[in-house]
Amino acid sequence: MAEDVYVIGTAMTKFGKYLDKGVKVLTGEVLELVLKDSGLERRDIEAAWFSNSGWGYHSFQHAVRGQVALSANGLDGLQIVNVENACASGSTALHSAWTSIKAGIYDCVLAIGAEKMYDNDKAKTMMMFMSGSDVEELPNFMAKFQEEERQRKEKEAREKGLEPPKVDAAGHSAFMDLYSIGARMHMEKYGTTQRQLACIAAKAHNNSMHNPFAQYIFPMTVEEVLLDREVSYPLTRAMCAPVGDGAAAVVLCSEKFLKQRASSGKAIRIRASVLRSGTKEGESDICARASKAAYEMASLGPKDIDVVEVHDATAFGELYQTEQMGFCPIGEGGPFAESGATAIGGRIPINPSGGLIARGHPVGASGLAQIFELVTQLHGKAGSRQVQGARIAMAENGGGFLGRGEAAMAIHILEGI
């Protein structure tokens, strides 16, 4: 039987906007932090999976990103695998590293992600996100949607006697439009309200107040979220993840390595690691499929989970995944969040870190930042955002779009030992 796999080190940089820092610098910062946290040296790392999605588009660094970023920081000569899987790149790197230990190939490996998303050229940043879709099909679909949006806004303005709002097409995110389409469909089918989405966003911002690594560290009320600038109805700016930069890393080891070299008191066992792809046709069921597989691998169910980090690129993303992961019935994600069930101290705390909405979303680092948060929670060291008694944690990280849902998704279940 394959050995268990353990997390013995995690780290992340503070997410933010760093025009003066490149991917090499961010990689070096988090590499030093994760080695310190694990108590290891560079020579102890047998292989590395490097997560990055946008460096090629941003700075034309393609093909050998991991070798370039890691060799610049004293880690080279070993197996380095480049991982690009849109917003799920970090969790895909983690899954791949986990697989190598499960297969008995390595005993101590590194999953590390760094990303530069912020640029003064907004159009450039938005095009980076667009590349995480079928670029032949998405433009026509979005052009139709955006024309309908333009007409809707003009009609609203005329009814109020106002000038039609100007649209910054260059800095507009097609992904936010895709999320807004999903939100509208959910509202029409189940009666979900914009206020319920605002409750999710306000929770994220208020949680991030206690997270020193978050990009946004300020509170917001539900009313402030609703009054923020509209991005794509029903989503306001405060309901959407910001653009930013950052890095995160995780060191994994085998049970043999743990007994010989590492401190078992810091180890977190990975009960499940699952990676799935979306489908082009039909309803999006990727999260339900991946969650089911993860629960079966871990011999657990939704009621066994104490704390969760989900991929909330928007507030609707959190609502939808809450349902798909089985924490509430389908269609009841809005009332569930509004009731306080997903707040710290609630029935199932979701995104105590502030999530992507407030912690930030440097694509290649986001999935690994989720693991950093959950390991911190399982160690009982999350301070004012600590989920009391947390022993089993779950992370969901989706990436890109295919059809009506994510193109890729990884789910991990962790257990404190």
Image (cartoon, rainbow, N blue to C red):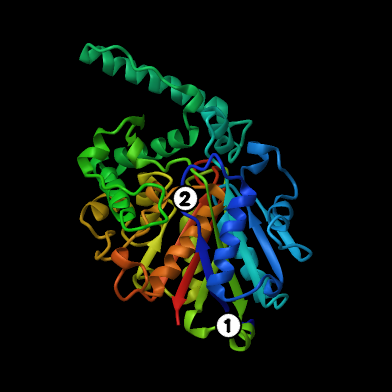
- Judged left or right of residue 181, residue 117 is right
Of label 1 and label 2, which has the lower sequence position?
Answer: 2
| Residue drawn at the location 58% of the way across and 80% of the way down | 4
The local crowd at label 1, few if under 14, some if 14 to 19, many if 20 or more residues have their Cα within 10 Å, is some
Q: Which residue is mark 2?
A: 15
Whether 312 is drawn above or below 268: the answer is above
Q: Position of residue 347 (x, y in %)?
A: 26, 66
The amino acid pointed to by label 1 is Ala
The C terminus - image quarter: bottom left
Q: Position of residue 390 (x, y in %)?
A: 35, 73
Whether 399 is drawn above or below 163: the answer is below
| Residue drawn at the location 64% of the way across and 86% of the way down | 256
In the rendered image, which quarter is residue 300 located in? Answer: bottom left
In the rendered image, which quarter is residue 111 located in? Answer: bottom right
Whether 381 is drawn above or below 69: the answer is below
Whether 28 is drawn above or below 151: the answer is below
The local crowd at label 2, few if under 14, some if 14 to 19, many if 20 or more residues have their Cα within 10 Å, is many
| Residue drawn at the location 55% of the way across and 44% of the way down | 400
Q: Position of residue 68 (x, y in %)?
A: 73, 52
The amino acid pointed to by label 2 is Phe
Q: Secondary structure at mark 2?
A: loop
As drawn, the residue found furthest toward the front would be 20
Q: Which residue is mark 1?
A: 262
Marks 1/2: CA distance?
29 Å
The N terminus - image quarter: bottom right
Q: Position of residue 246 (x, y in %)?
A: 52, 50
Q: Secondary structure at mark 1?
A: loop
